[in-house]
Amino acid sequence: MNTTPIDKPVRYYDQVYYSLREKIVQGVLQPGDSVYEARIARELNISRSPVREAVRALEKEGLLVIDGKSKITVYKPTMKDFEDIYECRIALESLAARLTTRLASEKELEEIEKSVVNPTPFLEGEEGRKELIDKNGYFHELIIQYTQNRRLMKQLRDLNSLSLYYRTLNFQGENREWTVYNEHKEVIEQMLRRDEDKASLMMKKHLETDLHHLREIFARK
């Protein structure tokens, strides 16, 4: 007898979590905005329990802040905070580039190379830009994934949510997508040559450029 697999229903927690996370990362919910569990539960016609669970998960990731009076607000970035995050990323991801250059298979390096995409097809509209930012993140995720170092992967994934927020800001500015594209090409070219030192250096320079650009954005605010 032929059977058709039954799709598992999406949990309420997952729906709330990914919806809130997307709104924060994309700027629909602005830094400092209040978030109300009861209101979300009413709008979605669900109990407060999965909403509370999703809020606590986002608090743990740093995207939501809960004060001593249980007031929930969207994470408000500061220059010191993003500098701290990027200092960690520079140290850890330059190491990740070195390890993946040394240890990744040819097929894995080809996968990383394919993730570096020409920005031109993605420059029209918000959806295209969002997809380009996602692909930018995927390039970094693959390099981290192929390090074969679980401890390093965990430390970088702990930074992931806030890094996504800054990646969205990082694409502000004229021709930023081309700067990122060219720097990614420089990183993967050295990885394909199996030059650990240069791959690590190119990743370090790439993230330092991002940090400098973000400093300029914050200075203008």
Image (spheres, rainbow, N blue to C red):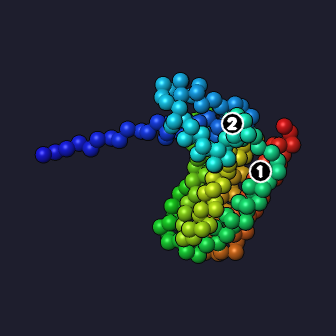
Spot occupied by residue 134 in the image (x, y as percentages of width and height): 58, 47
Q: Label 1 vs label 2: CA separation?
A: 25 Å
Spot occupied by residue 106 in the image (x, y as percentages of width and height): 50, 70
Where 144 falls versus 65 (above or below)? below
Residue depicted at 79% across the width and 48% down the height: 214
- Residue 186 appears anywhere in the view: yes
Residue projecting furthest to the left: 1
Residue 125: name its quadrant: top right
Residues packed near mark 2 inside 10 Å, few (<14), some (14 to 19) or many (20 plus): few
Q: Secondary structure at mark 1?
A: helix
Where 162 falls versus 188 (above or below)? above
Q: Amino acid at mark 1?
A: Phe
The numbered disc on residue 199 is: none
* Residue nearer the viewer, 163 or 63: 63
Where 26 falls versus 157 (above or below)? above
Q: Name the image quarter holding the C terminus.
A: top right
Residue depicted at 86% across the width and 39% down the height: 220
The residue carrying mark 1 is 82
* Residue nearer the viewer, 140 or 35: 35
Taking 151 as reference, is 88 left or right? right
Q: Nearer the viewer, mark 1 or mark 2?
A: 2
The residue carrying mark 2 is 70
